[in-house]
Image: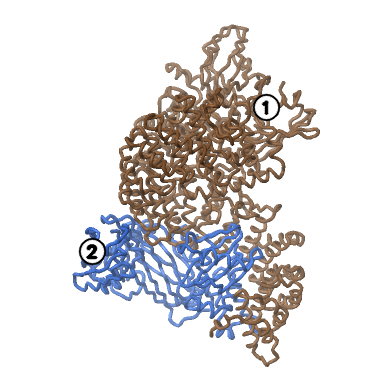
Amino acid sequence: MSDAKFFQRGKVHDLRAELTSEKKDPRHQRKKVAMKKVVANMTMGNDMSPLFQEVIACMGVPDLEVKKMVYLFLINYARARAEIANLAVNGFEDDVNDPNPLVRAMAIRTMGYIYVERVIESLIDPLRHCLRDRDPYVRKTAAMAVLKLSMFDRSLVEEERFLDMLKDLLADSNPSVVANAVAALTEISERSPHIKLKLNMKIANKLITALNECNEWGQIYILESLMYVVPQDSSDAETIMERIMPRLQHGNSGVVLVSIKVIAYMMNYVSQVEALEPILRKLSPPLVTLLTSGPEVQYITLRNIQLLLQRWPTILQNQLRAFFCKYDDPIYVKLAKLEVILSLTTEENARVVLTELTEYATEIDVDFVRKAVRSIGRIAIKIELAADRCVRALLDLIQTKVNYVVQEAIVVIRDIFRKYPNRYESIIGTLCENLDSLDEPEARAAMIWIIGQYADRIDNSDVVLGTFLESFLDDTAEVQLALLTAIVKLFIMRPTAGQDLVPKVLKWATEDVDSPDIRDRGFIYWRLLSTDPEMARTVVLSDKPEITAEGEKLDMPLLEELLLQVGTLSSIYRKPPSTFIPFAKKRVLGVSPALTRLTIAPPRVSRLPRTISSAMSQPATAAKQTNAQASDMPPVSATPRSSNTQLTSSALDISSGAVGGMSNPYINDYTPGPMAGNDAVLIDLMSMEDDEDAVDDSAAINSAGMVGFNANFGLSGMNLASMDSTNNAGAGATSQSSMPSSQQVLNSAFDAAGLDALSNMPTSATSLNRPSGNQSPMPDLMRQFTSSFDLSGASSGTLSAGGNAGSLLANSSSQLDPFQQQQAFQQRQLQPAAFSLSAPAGVSGGHFGSSSAFPAALSPTSTFFGANSASPFNNSVPFSPLAQSHNSNLTPNSAPPAIRNNESESTQTATSHANSKTDNSAALSREVDKLAAKMYNTGMLNSFSNNGGYTANVSGAVPYVPSQQVLLDATQTQGLEILGTFARRNGSIQMEMSFVNKSGMTIGDFAIQFNKNTYGITPSGSLNAGTVMPMSSVEVSLPLVTGGPTMVMQPLTNIQIAVKCTAGIFYFQTQYSLHILLEETGQSDQGMFLRMWKDMPDTMQNSHTAQNLRFASMEDMRNKLNMNSVFTVAQRSFGNATHFYTSSKLCDGSMFYSEIKVANNFQAAIIVTKSVNTRLIPLYQKAIEDICTAF
Amino acid sequence: MLSAVFIYNQKGEVLISRLYRHDVKRSVADVFRVHVISSPTSVVRSPVTTLGSTSFYHIRYDNLWLCAVTKNNASAAMVFEFLYRLLGLGVSYFGRFDEESVKNNFVLIYELLDEVLDFGYPQNIEVDTLKLYVTTESVRSTRALQSDALATIPQSITMQATGTTAWRRNDIVYKKNEAFVDVIESVNLIMSAKGTVLRADVQGQIVMRSFLSGMPECKFGLNDKLVLDRDPASGAAASASASASASGSTQLGRRQGGMGGFGDGESVEIADCQFHQCVRLGRFDTDRTISFIPPDGEFELMRYRTTENVNLPFKVLPVVREMGKTRIEYEVLIKSNFSAKLSATNMAVTIPTPPNATKCRIKVTGAGAGKAKYHPEENAIVWRISRFQGLQELALTAVVDLAPMTKPTPWSRPPIALDFQVLMFTASGLLVRFLKVFEKSNYQSVKWVRYMTKAGSYEIRI
């Protein structure tokens, strides 16, 4: 029997006649046929709502098929015809009491769909019954109906206590009912502003038990709900993971992916790195298996693999080949595979990958081929050893003369040139053969850059550039910029060759081009060249910041958020759900004592034989033995952990003392340094200069020191082991990886500084031949400088500075953003990385003496800071960069041209081409636009821009130094009393101490040693206390640096110190005020502040009240705060109060944003602080309070 | 969760439109048509399309587009699994799932959609259960919900639909209790032009057809390395002889003679496997036992994947020489690499030719070398061999003339693709060691096993 014939347009009145026909219809066949016609027409989009009345009349027909069609009709049209829908209520009321459970369920189900007041009202009572129906089918349908109801009227559900009934259903005996109840509860909480679903372990365990009996969809709902469990200790998380592990074998990819999501979430709560490895191993096979599903599921899997790989780089090791593209894979699968291949490329498999990519580069799909070519270039940048082979492959591809392949290859070769200067210049000749075929702007710009960069080595560079110049006015801005710079370079390197071209290009650039970018750069060059050619040379030919291939990496908070969304749409788009779903709640890792966020560092030197690497991760039980082994071992961070455990006392004979003991396994956040797997480490406490004394010293520790130790630190056991010196070679590796970011900053800061100095120079404006239309060239230029500085110097969020011209922003942000994110990210990552390398140091045995050099080399902040202070710009600028960037917001004409700095290449990265990235940043820029618009509306912008810039204006205020405290009581020692405090002066940390000798004899030969502490504070100089005569005292200032060996202390600012002197060795602990760790570079701009403030949920916020502030005026307070690196971003005055908005940056890069509300009488201040580093907020606020209440 | 499900025909006309939530209107069906189905770019760039805050997930099957719509951050994998399942449901109900069958059964499809999704949440999509109460006309009168017969039947239906073994009714009776196990392996290969294996893996499927009465409890065993290595006794037995263990200790009947083509008794390392939802995953996780209560009739019991020691049934040695711009010469040698007792059937070798090929002179050599023909519409020479004996060698030589092109574009050289089936051969070496059936009535059951290896994507680059 075929229904296809009903698929034709029926007229309403004909159908009405059929429905109301009086003809005999004993088996309801006529009605049925008529209804089918109605439904068919409804499907085709014809409006059947006029038939409402007639259709409702059919409800009474005792035929289930007709009934179902009537219901379908009602669902479709009831809303439009609410008044008639009421007529259906009677019919429903009969049905909900039908003895047949299927009919009851259907009635409940249908009523829930009909969002009409009257129908919903009449649903409430039956629904209550149905939730307790004896038939599970009815109960599970009723559970869903509650959800429907809540979407119609949220308050109704709460008033009628349906939520409680739903909760009761969680304990239902039938798994389908449980699953639907869970699904309903999850969505209700997801959409409700005040209902927050939280499941405890007891419920979680019950639900997991129900998993086994659920159908596949029910399993998905239940697994999804486990995301609302916040494990309170590591074992909870491990239990959950273990119990859902079997789901990875499920045939339904939805079940598998949601299981992976839960596991990825739970892994954040595991305290032992060892526990993670087997889990990660188990994740790989199912992920590969998912690649045998349909192409759609493959695509989703691949997108998620990318995320997982970034967080857990060790998964899918040796699975590379599974990602090789099949010829008939859909294009979206191929492109996604390519990304994964790139992430999995290592030194070992680079050759195989390269062969494969070369193969892809000959395929047909243009996008795919381009991406393949681009990937070859990225491998060259990522893996230095493979660079030669990559370049050869690219040259081969250029020989194919396929137009888009050639152009793509040239673009990536440009990046390779930048990464490896002076290595591949020999191929320029080959590149130049293809000049004619370049028609894409990006390729043209790349080629022009290459020629400009090597203008002095290419004989006819002037001719070639001249040829390009002919079409200058027809080219895109990108090409024009490149050409302008290239010709200036040519002129600087070969003045005679360039002298004809330069005036031409400068004239065109400044007079005939509309783009402010090019015009302004033209002016800069013009002025540079005409005033100080030497300066021009320095600026134009400055070293380029290094580029890396890792720019596509997401920054940590985003990655973390996306990993909570594995398998969902959000993970595919790599955007938080809130960006495309209006009601979406932001998901964060629930805070609990168990939250560790452990990471596993990927093996850096992967050639290391497995046996050794496992030996490395072994506890240093026999430190000596391993030491011997370690000397010829390459530096590896196998696992950033050297286990605590019982060091055997046989280690006593090793030269200097170290104490093994338990440290607190509590780990704070992902920002502070010592996060990586530090539940137990070797504490290197005392290292005495005199080796011969070592044994004696150890003995001293055992005797005299023991008391103090056990009392103070509660160490579980004390043993001696080898000196835990830092791994020098490892340190080198890390510091290298950190270099790009700091160097970048340095360079851009330099550029900005150079230009700034220049523009302040008395120049004869007349020599510049300006177009008269431009009224105020000077401020214009200045603005660019400042925004350029702003962008290069500040961290990732500074996008808002460019939040004006959409296209420009998209462009610039696509280039800048990866950079800055990376930069910020690296700063955060640096210390963990350092730690991961230094942790196994106990077994790898570097040179003892090197340990002090190591932190200095590593510390990102010192370089960073140095760069800034080297720049006259930062200190002498008469107005704040912040205010300025907002000004440029207001004047769209002066888009931030200098965003790309003085030379476009200095901020371009290899990754700036990535399509996906561009998409993202375009979206991001829209966001920023929106935000900017919002700021205008609320008037915040105005109040903000009136108060920019408090950076340097701190005269009169002095840094806060707490008064000295007694650290060591003379009664405990042989008469030595030590008082001390910590201070930060001019960007360096000091410990200021007084040694008071209350004994009868002279005390001298002072040495000091800090135990590992949370931020790796260590002395950077020696203790020059000299000798202290009896009954006299000495004041000492000990310079300190951060970046030494780290270990999380409790409280975080606790620090354990040992002092050796002729009177003995003494141990004590003290706490410092957090403000000494605040960087002088913590000034945030307003856009950034707003964005971060908005982004951070209330869970990252804390409020604190400080009383009895000691200030004379608001300005006084502001200065005082600024002096102590609590920078005012903005300030608003109200009648009797003033609000400060402040930012600070900790030495590890984590930011604190605060709103400080101060009453005008300075009675009290309310400090509301937000930071991802939630653990530190109270300490930070305490520091502010101390600053504000100090004399 | 899903807000709507649409089914379109090839032209983009809506055949089925079912809205589940009020956050979308019927008109979004047109949005998808305009942006995706009728989009000028013929290649679909993503299976998910998000327009504004509305996301469309689609799959294509036959001449249909199946599209699910959401307004929230749904689990994409789940949505696609649902669409796949919906497809399976259609095929199972109507035999085929195409425009015609959708139109012919649209009322039924609406009924099914009402049942399988509640407020956009997938519910029970088990064909067996659904067929109990969402029925085609003829069955309806007997089973359906006539008011007088209500007392018992719906109860059992609802228990079935919500119960722990939703996939099986408990009232099944067969006179003769039989179970058929088909091990079907697809070999995937990517081989470089130089003959190096870039990637070789086997995707296996164990399909079972059970015709067993009552609620049988089945246990299933393979020569899985993990199991065999764990249990030394059975490991020894397995290494003694797989065929012995297959015929002797396990009561497995066979339709065909001894297995050939791979080493006996090897255990197989399964990289990963997935099971039908009837399999108790918890038990598999603890002791690698595959135990289950099977659905009635045919179902896919498990899928597995192996990557180690793949026995490639065919080796292909291609030589392709471009002789200037006008001619290409091919020499393709194929060797079979399995026992001479076995043979491959329905073999087809697709050898791609450039788009500007004009004439092909083809010669095949070897006994039973089949026929090779140039198919201009496919840009390929297709060589069909009805029967390819084990340990045999066949060769093809061809000379292809090319038409001169005004704008020479290089030829992308797609890979040579093989299609074949080899019975009683598994490329992974996997064997079924036993299938045990326990039922409370303790009946005797007959079990059959069959092996087949076929080409998945068997590509040799040239």
Q: Is residue B236 visible?
A: no
Q: In which quarter of the image is residue B392?
A: bottom left
Tell me which colouring the rendered structure shows. by chain
Query: Residue A774: which numbered mark, if any?
Result: none
Left or right: A483, with A714 as reference point = left
Return the chain for callout 1: A
Measured Cα–Cα span from mark 2 to mark 1: 80 Å
Rendering colour (chain A): brown
Left or right: A377, with B129 as reference point = left
Q: What element carries label 2?
A: strand
Q: Mark 2 points at which residue?
A: B332
Q: Where is residue A323 in the image (x, y as percent from the top left)?
A: 40, 54
Q: Is mark 1 on a helix, strand or loop?
A: helix
Q: Do discs 2 and 1 share a chain?
A: no
Return the chain for callout 2: B
Answer few, some or many: residues within 10 Å of disc 2's Cα (few below 14, many 20 plus, some between 14 and 19). Answer: some
Q: Which amino acid does label 1 sit on?
A: Leu
Q: Is residue B372 visible?
A: yes
Query: Residue A1121: which numbered mark, if any?
Result: 1
Q: Say if A933 sits above or below B7 in the image.
A: above
Q: Position of residue A249 (x, y in %)?
A: 47, 59
Q: Where is residue A610 in the image (x, y as percent from the top left)?
A: 36, 42
In what quadrant of the picture does the C terminus of chain A appear? top right
Q: Which chain is blue?
A: B
Q: Say if A471 sits above or below A1043 in the image.
A: below
Q: Position of residue A569 (x, y in %)?
A: 55, 56
Q: Say if B156 sits above or below A217 in the image.
A: below
Q: What residue type is labelled 2?
A: Val
